[in-house]
Image: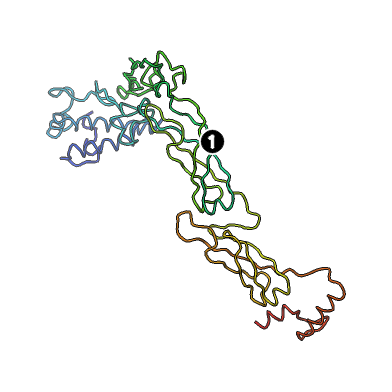
Amino acid sequence: MAEQKRDYYEVLGLQKGASEDEIKKAFRKLAKKYHPDMNPGDKSAEAKFKEVNEAYEVLSDPDKRSRYDQYGHAGVDPNFGAGGFSGGYGGAGMDFDLGDIFGSFFGGGFGSGFGSNGGTRRNGPRRGSSIQAGITITFEEAAFGCEKEINITRMDTCSTCGGSGCAPGTTPEICPDCHGSGTIRVQQRTPFGVMQTTQECPRCHGQGKIIHQPCSECHGSGSVRKQKKVNVTIPAGIANGQTLSLRGQGNAGTNGGAPGDLLITVTVKPHAKFKREGSSIYSTEHITVAQAILGVSLEVDTLDGKVKYNVPEGTQSGTVFRLKGKGVPSIRGGSRGDHFVTVVVDIPTGLNAEQKGIIRKFDESMGGKSTGDKFSFFEKKKKKK
């Protein structure tokens, strides 16, 4: 009964006098919230969806809204004046495309693709797919950059048909079913009204065209597999495992679409002497006990070749020296990192009696004892510091 119905403005959460835009916005929000597809098996949501549709059907119609504002529910009763609401989802004879209602909620199309916005044009230009390749370079090439040439296999636009897929001198037929769109609309009458869904055209399989005489070279695909040499510029400072992207060197696009990219993963061979962390390089230099005690001028291996470095006397094993600016350049440009050299003092083994005697005398000259002294020579040096 009409007197048992809730106020239509209350149903939509609006005040009397709301604008058309406010009514439409409120309806869309509530229709999405209570739609049966969003609430399967929920009878309460189904009833509210029906109530929301009924309120919108009246308030969105200027004539019905005017009678409702003046006479209430009686003003839109089927027996009152002209017309009225017939009940049911969406009203009698209300054919609607859910894509018009829900398209804005889901970026075009609701569920499986309602309405004209539900599907994408499959026969439009499509960008080609990207392909992957790998390249191996030396430690030095990674540090300073280099030029390399690699062989790749990719799908190129067929030169015989120019990518159309048709034999020379022929043209494809526009699909008579979808008229070139690649999709067709299917209507289905449901308890909620007439719903429209967008589906792939079964006749042209979504291409929008039918090729009666395919190209003999590409067999109608518009592209052929080819091998090609590609020049690659490896930037200075690239690290092991990084990937370079060469735009437009991937597989050919379709229907006039741009080609994809070539993704090259770089593998850097390990160095026999250097280790790398970021832009820093680490290496180790071995010296004798005498060199550690007296100091020594070393020739240190670096990326730039041998560099002289004066190791001061009394250097302890494990001491780290920094060679500024001798590391790896930043891949983003700018200054180079540093080279850190760890000094390792090699303790001799297998001494003969004469050599051991010399060491004992030396230890005694430093104020120690030949045996059993609490501190050795090196420990005394540390203690003095």
Where residue 161 appears, as percent x and y from the top left, is 40, 21
Where residue 50 appears, as percent x and y from the top left, is 29, 30
* Label 1 residue SS: strand
Q: Tell me the residue that label 1 is attached to.
A: 151
Which residue shows up at 45% across the image and 25% down it? Answer: 223
**Callout count:** 1
The part of the image, by quadrant, that contains residue 66 is top left
Q: Nearer the viewer, residue 163 or 9?
A: 163
Few, some or many C-alpha atoms within 10 Å of disc 1 (few <14, some 14-19, many ≥20)? few
Left or right relative to 2: residue 262? right
Residue 104 in the image: above or below residue 188: below
Where residue 327 appears, as percent x and y from the top left, is 54, 60
What amino acid type should be assigned to the residue bearing mark 1?
Answer: Asn
The quadrant of the picture occupied by the N terminus is top left
Extreme-top residue of the structure: 212
Where residue 49 appears, as percent x and y from the top left, is 31, 32
Residue 72 in the image: above or below residue 237: above
Which residue shows up at 22% across the image and 35% down it? Answer: 8
Q: Nearer the viewer, residue 36 or 182?
A: 182
